[in-house]
Amino acid sequence: MTGSTGDGSTVPPELAELASAHGVQCEYTDHDGVLQQVSASTLVAVLEALGVQSSTPGAVAASLDRVRDDEWRAMLPPVVVTREGTEVQIPVHVADGADVTAWVELEQTETPAVPTSATPWRVSAPQPTATGSFAVVRRTRVPLRQADVYAEPRTVDSRKVGRATFTLPDSLPLGWHTLHAESGGQTAQATLVVTPERLELRKKIARKQAWGFMVQLYSVRSRDSWGMGDLADLGDLAWQTAHNGGADFVAINPLHGTEPVSPLTPSPYLPTSRRFMSPLYIRVEDIRETAYLSAADRSLVEWAAEPVRELSEDSGPIDRDAIWEAKKAALEVVYTAPRSAARQTAFDEFVLAQGRGLVDFATWCAIKEHLDGRDWPRELADPGSSGVTTLRSALSDRVQFYCWLQWVADEQLRAAHRAGLDAGMRVGVLKDLAVGSSPDGADAWADSGVLAQGVSVGAPPDMYNQQGQNWSQPPWHPRALAKVGYAPYREMLRTVLRHCGALRVDHVLGLFRLWWIPGGARASAGAYVTYDHEALIGILCLEAQRAGVAVIGEDLGTFEPWIRDYLAERGILGTSVLLFERDDAGAPVEPEAYRSAALATVTTHDLPPTAGYLAGEHVDLRERLGLLTEDATILRGRARAERESLVEALSRRGLTTFAPSERELVEGLHRYLKDTPSALVGVYLTDAVGERRAQNQPGTDTEYPNWKVPLADSAGSVVLLEDLFSNARLRSLVTVMNEEDPEPAK
């Protein structure tokens, strides 16, 4: 089609066809329901980032010719993702008229048993396991039946190619298998993933509504913290809120990896790595070897802790750089302490289990540290290069140090999750997965082959962010990721799903499509690029089921209506935010109309706490920062009307009076959520103590102390972990959350 765009240009039909063939959407519906056309220049920039030549009409024509025959060039598709119990037909491309066979080799399993002659497996030589012992690797081969499906042969690159169709049986087990084909001495293989039809919410969670606190862990500090909340604080918080408050979970910000040297990026949603953790959250004193340090080494640890520990009672912005410098110095002392044979074996097994990904991450950290602020040399751009191999060897002790930090953090996270479960939580820790990672980080370095270059991820304008958002993150390249069988995505999920009872996927809509912004362009001048959501969601369900973890998708923003139905069908909970839940007339949606398969909260971390929001402080803040594109007076009027509608809805249900106090209004809104059928209800800890400052103001960088605000009460006084349940406002809200339970969520 040819359509007018926002910049007055038109999109040639050939360019539109090419964009569509590569999953680039030429139009989208904005938050006001208005259809917007994407400019031709944006489409070209996005296609070029996908590696598709499109800058001239001739290039567009050549790229169209190529994409029409692409699937015929390979014997097998790069990857096949299907659901259990589903019969699927697979195309196999060979020389026209040639014979072909196809089969599936099921996922390898290890067992110490010796197979008998009746066992239908081919047995390879024994393989060493993580403990050094040997196990038998069993492989099952499942032959595939060729279907009677005729396809017209096609001439591709001067070669006549035919298509044979094979049927995958519906009896294949869940897992990661390998699809094979052979014809005329040529062979091919591809990844085959069989995923669950539906990720079932664990019975222990599903039997009745569960509630828990939503926290930014770095902001929740104790007197023993090193200036910010850590994993020991998480364990104590989980125990306290379960034992004293009856909570079933504690939901935390992403704990993803940060830079190994200052300055550190404060946003937990712009990490250097999504797969690995930030050692900032380690509690040094809880490492077992710390107890056996010499007096001199113990003094070094204590001296490092003293200045930053004093920061825990400071209401000013959290200083991650100072905290990391102190903590890193102490961790280096503990790292050199001897480990027992059992502890060393546990560390070695952790490194072996995490595989090449951990070694690459630790290598990146060691090189980043070694460069000491200098530009990254071109010869070190590829993790597999000889330059990196040489430097990894020279920095081997630092590489091991950064591997060790991951092991320590993993152990402490496991302990924190276990503390909540032991105290009676039904879920425990609810982790958060960011949309992407930094363009200059470890993931971008290690996974550069499956990330698109020259673009970043963000969001088009909406009523809260009227200039759009640029999150500065490189997106997955859809085809490149498929070509490697989604391995980087799988390995990231397997690590993130450790030691938690549930996982929140930030902007889960990004598994369907992402807003790509060409480099140097405004956030509003982007385009949506679609992904194979059946594959990405299916793999998420498979890995979550194996880990025994429930999944919550943050399905807010601009999206197509069918997406929520699809997520519910796959067993992924949605997200309902009371402040955003409005009917067609603009009134608050009645509690009974909420989804049962959802995590319901009053607000989000991208808005001021509820009391501040309903006082219109989000308008005041954006006005001061110059982020408004509408008149502030109009927006304040909308904020007042929103508050009045909420008060009316609460009063109508007898949940508060027509003139509620700030505390009564906050408690009434949470009672409103308790009346919903939502499986999970989240209470922001900031609302529980009366905090009014926002943790994050989207659209800003240095203009606001994003992700640096420590937990404080309404007067701005710091609230420490030890004093949480001495806070009258928190105790009152906890009482509300533990009032008579609603009927079990359906």
Image (cartoon, rainbow, N blue to C red):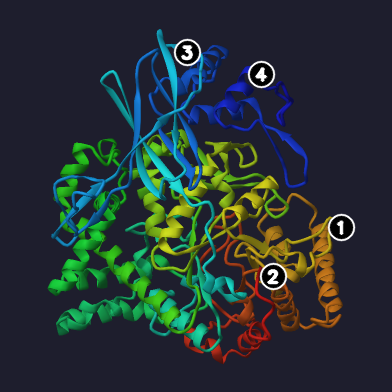
What residue is at 70 percent from the left and 55 percent from the top?
A: 464
Residue at numbered disc 2: 677
Residue 179, compared with residue 225, is above or below; it is: above
| Quadrant housing the N terminus | top right
Q: Secondary structure at mark 4?
A: loop
Label 4 or label 1, whichever lies nearer to me, is: 1
Q: Which mark is residue 153?
A: 3
| Mark 2 Cα shell of 10 Å, populated few (<14), some (14-19), many (≥20) | many
**Residue 286, quarter of the rendered image:** bottom left
Q: Nearer the viewer, mark 2 or mark 3?
A: 3
Of the image marks 1 and 2, the number of the one nearer the N terminus: 1
Q: Is residue 491 above or below residue 664?
A: above
Q: Marks 2 and 4: which is nearer the front?
A: 2
The location of residue 484, given as percent across then percent down, is 37, 37
Name the residue at 30% across, 46% down: 374
Tell me, for residue 585, which label it has, or none: 1
Label 3, label 4: how many angstroms apart (C-alpha)?
Answer: 31 Å
Residue ID for mark 4: 12
In space, the residues marked 1 and 3 are separated at their CA atoms by 57 Å
Q: Nearer the viewer, mark 1 or mark 3?
A: 3
Q: Are marks 1 and 2 in contact (CB under 8 Å)?
A: no
Q: Is residue 114 above or below residue 418?
A: above
Task: Residue 5: tell me if it is visible.
Answer: yes
Q: Are marks 4 and 1 in contact (CB under 8 Å)?
A: no
In the rendered view, tell whether residue 125 sits above or below residue 577.
Answer: above
Marks 2/4 in contact by CB < 8 Å: the verdict is: no
